[in-house]
Amino acid sequence: MGRLLRIITVLVAVIIVVIVGLATFIHFYLTEDRLKALIIPPAERTLGRKIDVGNIKAGLFSGIVVRDVIIKEADGKADFARLRTFVLRYSLLPLLHKNLEVNTIVIDSPFVRLIREKDGHFNYETLKFLSRSPRPGTRVQRPARPSSPPAAEALPLFLTVDRIHVKDAKVELLDKSGEIPKTEAKADMKLSLKIGRDISSMKYDGELIFSVTSKYGNLNPLISGNSKFNQQVVDFSVDLLTDGQRVSLTGQARNYLKAPNIKLDITSDEIDLDRLLATAASLPSAKGKKTVARSTQGREGSTSTDTGMANPIQVNGNLAFRKILYSGIEIKNLKGTYQFKDQRLVIRDISTQVADGTINSTLTIDLNKAEPGYQGNLLIKGVNLGKIVSDLSTTRRLGRISAIAGLNLTFSGAGSTWPVMRETLSAIGNYHLKDVEIGETPITRAISLLLGLKELGILRFDTIDGNLKIHRGDVLVKAKMSGNDVSASADGKVGLDGRLDMPLTITLGPKLTKKLKSRASITRYLMTENGQAVVSLRLAGTISKPAPRLNTAAIKEKAEKEIRQRAFQALEKVLDKKSSQKGQSSNDTGNERMPAGKLLKGLFGR
C-alpha cells in the first residue's frame, strides 16, 4: 500500500512538474514579441496586406487572447478589416486522448469594409490568396481525374468547440459608382461545433441574429431577422421594412447543403404600392453608367451558358396579405399557396376581395425554356368596375365606366417582354356585366357626334353578355347589350395595341328614334317594322381615337328597296288606271280583264 502511494505521489509530482514546466516555457518563451513574429509575417504574406496587432497573450490554461487586429487596404493606409478581440480557451487533458476540446472562441466586434471602385473592381480582389490566377496565355495544368473518388482525409484529432460567439460583427458596402446602395450589415452568432476524424462527420448547432440597412436615394430599407440552424435544418424569421411597410418571411429549410427543400411563408399587414412605386421612381438612375466586363480567363469551371442546377431547389409556402393599395384600389385578404419545383412555379388557390367582389385565380410559370411559359385561369365575380377604374390613370383618359362584372377566363402564353407576350398570349372566356354605364369615352363621344344625339354620349345597359378570345395580338369580342333606351350587338376585334375593327349594331328606343327622325333625313332607311331605328356602324381607328362609320351598304340596300317599292307602287297605279279604262270598253263588248296591279303582284310575287 505504501509503495502504491509512493508511485502515485511520484506520478502526481511528474505531472505537476510537466505542467509547471510547460506553463513556464509558454510564459517565458512564447512572449508577445515572439508570438507576433510567429503569426504576423505569414499572415501578411498570405493576405498581401499589412497587419497590425495590439497585443497577444498565451497561457497554458488561459488560452490565447489577441487584441486590436487591423488589416490594411492595399495602399497600407485605410483599414480593410478590424477585430477588437479574439479569445480561444481550451481544455488541456483531452489532448492526451487526441481530442481538442475548445471551451470558448470569442470573436468580438469584427469589421470588414467592402468598396467597389468606379471601374467595377472590389477592394477584396487584391488579397493575395484571391489573385493567384494565371497570366493571360498561360496554359493551366489540370490534375488528372482520379479513377475513383478519394476517401475523406483523416484528421489527426477530434475537435469539439463548446461555444463560438461572434459579437457585434459588422460589414459595410460602399459603391463609388453609386450603382449599389450603401449597405451596412450587423450580426451576432452563437455556435457549437463537433468534428470527428473527417469533415463529413461535422455537426454544429447555432443561432444567428442579424440586420441589414441600405440607403439608396430616398429609400432606406431594413432587413432584420433571426435563425436557428444545424447541419440539417435552418429555421428562420425575417422582416423587410421600408417606408413604414413590413413584409414578413418565415419558414424552414431542410437538406440545404445538398438539395434544399424550403418552406417559406410570405405575409404582410398592409402594402401601399403607390407609395413604394413613387419612392422607387425617385431613386438615382444608373442610366449611362458602364459596367466593366469581368474576364474569366484562367478560371476553371466558369461558364456563361450553364443555368442548370445539379440539385434543384424546392420552395413552397403560403401567401397572405391583409391589404394592398394600388391607384386607390383596395385589395383585401389576398391569399394563396405556391410551389417552385423542377424550375416550375405553380400558384394555386389565389383569392382576394376587390371592389365588393371576389377574384380567384391559378397560375403556372415554366422557367425551363428561354422564354418562360405561363398558363392559368381567372374567375371574377361581382366586382364593381366603377370603384376600380375611376382612379386608374388610363381610364381617366378614356372616360367613365361602371358595372358589376363577372368573368371566367382561361389563358396561356410565353415571354418576359411585352412584344413577345403580345404575340404568344391566347385566352378564351365569357363575361357578364349588369347595371352598366359607359360615359364620356372617346367611342361614345364619336358615336354621339356621328348620329347627332348627345344622349349617346352616356350609354346605359341593364346587361351585357358575351365571350372573348385572344389570339396573336387581337381580342375577338362578341357582345349582346340590352337596355331600355339603347340596345346593341357587337362582333369584331380589338387589338392589344388599341386598334379597333368592330362592327356594331345599335337599336334605338322610341324616344331616341323620334329624335333621330327630326335630325336625319336617312332615318326612314333605318326603321324596322316595329318603328325602331337600327343603326349599323363599324368602329375603326383606336380606342383613344375611334373613327366610327355608318354601314352604307345596309342603308343603300334599304334605300334601293324603298325606291323599288315606290316605283312599283307608281307603276301599279298607272297600269291600274289604264286597265280600268280598257275595262270599260271591254264591258261594252261583254269581255272581263284582270286588273294590272294584281297581274304585277302575281308576276313579281308582291
Image: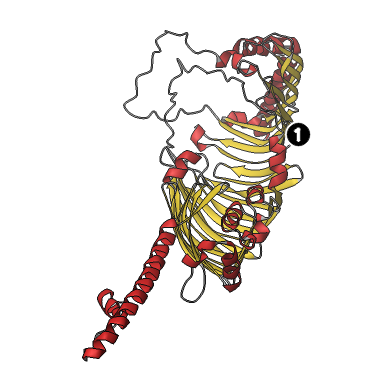
Res. 159 image quadrant:
top right
Instruction: Name the spot of residue 560 as percent of width and height, x first.
Output: 39, 63
Check disc 1: other Cα within 10 Å, few if <14, some if 14-19, many if 20+: few
Instruction: Name the spot of residue 369 as percent of width and height, x first.
Output: 40, 40
Q: How is the image coloured?
A: secondary structure
Q: Which of the pair 203/222 is nearer the observer?
A: 222
Furthest-bottom residue in this view: 590
Q: Which of the pair 204/434 is nearer the observer?
A: 434
Judge from the rendering whether residue 13 lies leftward or rightward of residue 368; answer left or right: right
Residue 400 visible here = yes
Q: Which of the pair 43/71 is nearer the observer?
A: 71
Judge from the rendering whether residue 277 lies leftward or rightward of residue 199; answer left or right: right
Mark 1, secondary structure of its residue: loop
Residue 526 visible here = no
Q: Looking at the figure, which quarter contains the N terminus?
A: top right
- Identify which residue is drawn at 68% across, 23% down: 178
- Marks counted in the figure total 1
Instruction: Name the spot of residue 184 as percent of width and height, x first.
Output: 72, 30
Task: Identify whether 511 is placed above or below 229.
Answer: below
- Identify which residue is drawn at 39% across, 28% down: 150
Task: Identify whether 363 is placed above or below 200.
Answer: below
Q: Which of the pair 467/406 is nearer the observer?
A: 467
Q: Looking at the figure, which quarter contains the C terminus?
A: bottom left
Q: Which residue is mark 1?
A: 218
- Identify which residue is drawn at 58% across, 53% down: 446
Res. 370 image quadrant:
top left
Which residue type does callout 1 highlight? Answer: Asn
Instruction: Name the spot of residue 532 as percent of width and height, x first.
Output: 52, 72
